[in-house]
Image (cartoon, helix red, strand yellow):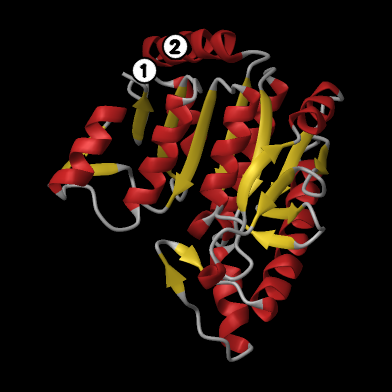
Amino acid sequence: MMNSQEKAQALIEAFHYVKSFKDRIMVIKYGGNAMINEKIKESVFGDISLLRQLGQKIVFVHGGGPFIDRQLQEAGIQKVVRNGLRVTDAKTLEIVVNIFKEINRECVELFQRHHIAAQDCTDGLLLTRITDDCLGYVGDIIKVNRQLLLDTLDQGLIPVVSSIGTTASGQKTNINADTAAVEIAVSLQAAKITILTNVDGVFLGDTLISHMNIQDIKTGIDKGTITDGMIPKLMACSRAVEQEVAKAHLINGTIEHALLLELFTESGIGTEVVKS
């Protein structure tokens, strides 16, 4: 249990960070197991609602991998992944779009339950093109309609974004949610992007690496100390800070109140990525 002095110090520490982030934009990418566990889900939306009430501007980007995987299995469609991207044929795309609509609707309702207004900002936000026919309807982002997000934020709303894009001809495309969140953060020159993952951060052996820069990431990938699913996430963080987003964070979204711990404590949690 904390004594009175420790509680006061914690409040002072938190207040410092509240002031530093007031009226600044933060992009949060939500996905993985944090979407499945009801207690954690409540924690995530409660924390974001508190951040909004404290004056932070939030853009909320969601994925939906676990739900898509389950629906594909029920439909008898095999999941195929190439270079970390889901191969998306017409039937898979239909499933992805429908599931994302449901998730987006639920996210808006959860914010409203916490007395925070939110709005689906997916349509017309991400202009994409299809560059690899082997991946099917997977889109590369070529433009973000940042004004749509800024207008929504100015209305006091949280934009809720599904990682679905549209080509110039009107074809919907599937986008990696981490990539979508990063490109949105870059377009807005956000103060921070936070990616909720299923792990505590980046490890070197058994040691959690709390701070990395772009060169650390390149070296780790070249040496093979950064592997598997952490590579695309760290590459996404590297892209963000390289394009002048001040900070990127990978944190374990399955830890209760992870967002508050990362933002409002000196030690923080997870792995922070900066430019240099």
Amino acid on which the number 1 mark rests in the picture: Glu
Q: Residue at x 22, y 45 (%)?
A: 221
Answer yes or no: is residue 234 visible.
Answer: yes
The local crowd at label 1, few if under 14, some if 14 to 19, many if 20 or more residues have their Cα within 10 Å, is few
Describe the element under mark 2 as helix, strand or loop: helix
32 sits to left or right of 173: left
In the rendered structure, find residue 266 and report the number of the disc placed on it: 1
Q: Residue at x 61, y 88 (%)?
A: 74
Q: Quadrant of the C terminus?
A: top left
Vertical relation: 50 (above or below) 172: above
**Which residue lies under the disc numbered 2?**
13
Vertical relation: 233 (above or below) 238: below
The local crowd at label 2, few if under 14, some if 14 to 19, many if 20 or more residues have their Cα within 10 Å, is some
Answer yes or no: is residue 1 visible.
Answer: no
Residue 118 image position (x, y, % from top left): 81, 39
Q: Residue at x 59, y 81 (%)?
A: 72
Q: Are marks 1 and 2 in contact (CB under 8 Å)?
A: yes
Vertical relation: 224 (above or below) 89: above
